[in-house]
């Protein structure tokens, strides 16, 4: 936005600091009025004919706009989608480990995409995959809502789970220390998995 002597128009429509229309005048005339009041001249509608300018405190205006932008950014919640991969024949221990990770992601406010891959002859037994997906939904039922029901795409079956704010609030009320304990246990589980992977 152009301020004071940066304004290039021959004539401008001027609004004063109290919102009163002062009419059409040249930039030097408007600047003189602004300077007499210890304020700035700001071009607020450069495409209007003639351009509209307002007499105001430019520093204060900039500061308030910055504050508004920061507040708007704080209100925005960045939702990431975490993926959990399953197989139709994933054993119980692996299933629980993966779903505990899913619980942690949901508690952190992230969405969870459960993807299940069928290999070879497993394609003939899609009902096994559906059973796994139902188990997944039941495992996180106290935290999540199903955003997209299980569906097939090629050789994969997908399920989308989202955090349910009401359920999570209820869970945290019932487990104020438990959620921290869960995170600690999951971190230990992750370390064990990484060690096994290195071997």
Image: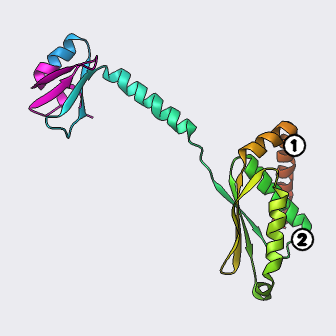
Q: Residue 165: percent from the left, percent from the top? A: 72, 44
The image quarter in which residue 18 lies: top left
Q: Is residue 194 visible?
A: no
Disc 1 crowd, CA 10 A, few/some/many (<14, 14-19, 20+): few
User: Is residue 123 located in the magenta-colored stretch of the structure?
Assistant: no
SS category of the residue bearing label 2: loop
Q: Say above or below: 164 vs 122.
A: above
* Residue found farthest to the right: 92
- 180 or 155, nearer to the observer: 155
- 11 or 186, nearer to the observer: 11
Q: Residue at x 37, y 21 (%)?
A: 60
Q: Residue 157: percent from the left, percent from the top? A: 71, 74
Q: Quadrant of the C terminus?
A: bottom right
SS category of the residue bearing label 1: helix
Q: Residue 144: percent from the left, percent from the top? A: 76, 53
Q: Say above or below: 174 vs 83.
A: above
- 199 or 106, nearer to the observer: 106
| Residue 91: mark in rendering | 2
* Residue at mark 1: 181
Q: Residue at x 69, y 47 (%)?
A: 109
Q: Quadrant of the N terminus?
A: top left
The image quarter in which residue 59 lies: top left
Disc 2 and disc 1: Cα gap in Å? 25 Å
Mark count: 2
Point out the stretch of residues depicted in magenta.
Answer: 1-30
Q: Is residue 158 visible?
A: yes
Q: Earlier in the sequence, mark 2 or mark 1?
A: 2
User: Is residue 20 located in the magenta-colored stretch of the structure?
Assistant: yes
Q: Residue 53: percent from the left, percent from the top? A: 21, 28
């Amino acid at each position: 936005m152009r301020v004071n002597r940066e304004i290039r128009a021959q004539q401008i429509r001027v609004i004063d600091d109290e919102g009163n229309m002062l009419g059409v005048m040249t930039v030097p005339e408007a600047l003189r009025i602004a300077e007499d009041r210890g304020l700035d001249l700001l071009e607020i509608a450069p495409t209007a004919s003639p351009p509209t300018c307002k007499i105001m405190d430019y520093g204060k205006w900039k500061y308030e706009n910055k504050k508004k932008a920061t507040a708007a950014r704080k209100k925005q919640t960045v939702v990431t989608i975490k993926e959990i991969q399953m197989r139709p024949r994933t054993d119980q221990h692996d299933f629980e480990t993966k779903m505990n990770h899913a619980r942690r992601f949901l508690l952190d406010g992230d969405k969870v995409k459960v993807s299940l891959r069928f290999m070879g002859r497993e394609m003939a037994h899609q009902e096994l995959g559906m059973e796994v997906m139902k188990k997944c939904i039941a495992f996180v039922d106290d935290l999540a809502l199903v955003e997209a029901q299980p569906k097939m795409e090629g050789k994969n079956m997908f399920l989308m789970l989202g955090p349910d704010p009401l359920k999570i609030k209820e869970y945290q009320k019932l487990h104020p220390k438990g959620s921290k304990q869960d995170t600690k246990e999951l971190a230990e589980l992750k370390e064990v998995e990484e060690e096994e992977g290195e071997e």
